[in-house]
Amino acid sequence: MDLKYILQALVLSACLSPLATHAQKIEESSFNATDLIASTNNIKKIFNLESHDYDKYTGDEINQVCAGCHGEFGMGGSDGKYPRIAGLSIPYIIKEIVLFRERLRPNIAMVEHVEERQLANDEVMDIAIYLNKIKLNNRLSIIDENAPDFDAYARLQEAKSVLQIGRTEGDIKKGKKLYKKECKSCHGKKGEGNQEDATPRLAGQYQKYLWRQINLYIKGKRLHDEDDPEEEFLKDFSKEQLGDIFAYISTLDD
């Protein structure tokens, strides 16, 4: 190998090493519950959706950046490494962006995109509304591809916006019973979330992502309920019970 390229590689490695160490510290850090609750309450004062003049074109432009990980239509990808963000409630999207920005929800991949100098508060509302308006189908429409007026490009675009979440192993009947008892009141009868509150939809979300978040809640890396920061009810479920709940959730977008 050319000596010039070896030297360049060594310099780059030296530059990236501190960044990697910093990234690891961010990922492994724990949030401050008091700060998180204060930030969540403050969001309602700062982001006035009723008076916001939504700019669809700004939302679309920002989404082109989001698409690098979350897909053109916010469908996520890599089997749950990047979650579905299309159709999430507007208050939830805003809250999570702010928590990423303030390092109260550690995620190194989000840091560079959510700083206020990169994403002003008005733009946060624009992308939240834009993503919320995206509707994903779970199957392609039935059409005659041999018809004279068949539009191949339109069909391709439709295919891109189709999201099918595979079934998860577990006892669906037991999961349904547990879901109705423990999850339905906040996340909705069909896992649709709450559009008026910052409660995310669970239906149509990647199971790998949901498992990752559950583990963060159990380990105290995320706060499940700002109104009850001391609650630890997720720790009361066995892995089998959680698996049953996820098995049921995986049927909700059928």
Image (cartoon, grey):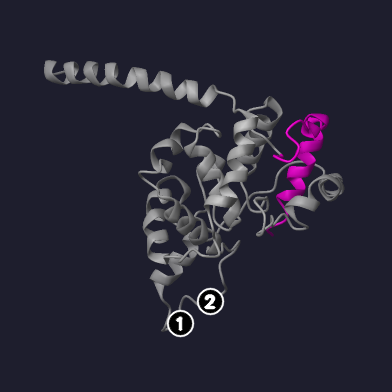
- As for residue 101 lying within the magenta part, the answer is no
Picture coordinates of residue 124, whole percent (x, y): 46, 52
Q: Nearer the viewer, residue 66 or 225?
A: 225
Query: Which residue was labeled with disc 1?
Result: 147
Residue count near mark 2 (Cα–Cα under 10 Å), binned few <14, some 14–19, many ≥20: few
Q: Residue at x 55, y 23 (%)?
A: 29
Q: Quadrant of the C terminus?
A: bottom right
Q: Above or below — where is 200 with respect to 23? A: below
Q: Amino acid at mark 1?
A: Ala
The circle on residue 42 is: none
At which x and y percent is residue 250? 70, 50
Q: Quadrant of residue 197?
A: bottom right
Q: Residue at x 68, y 32 (%)?
A: 217
As helix, strand or loop, the secondary structure at mark 1 comes to loop
- Say which residue appears at 47% left-offset and 22% top-offset: 24
Q: Are marks 2 and 1 in contact (CB under 8 Å)?
A: yes
- Inspect the magenta stretch and tell me whether residue 234 lies in it: yes
Relative vertical location of residue 42 with respect to residue 61 in this rendering, above or below: above
Q: Is residue 189 left or right of residue 45?
A: right
Residue 143: image tag? 2
Magenta span covers which residues?
225-254
The spot of residue 104 in percent (x, y) is 55, 33
Q: Is residue 234 above or below residue 194?
A: above
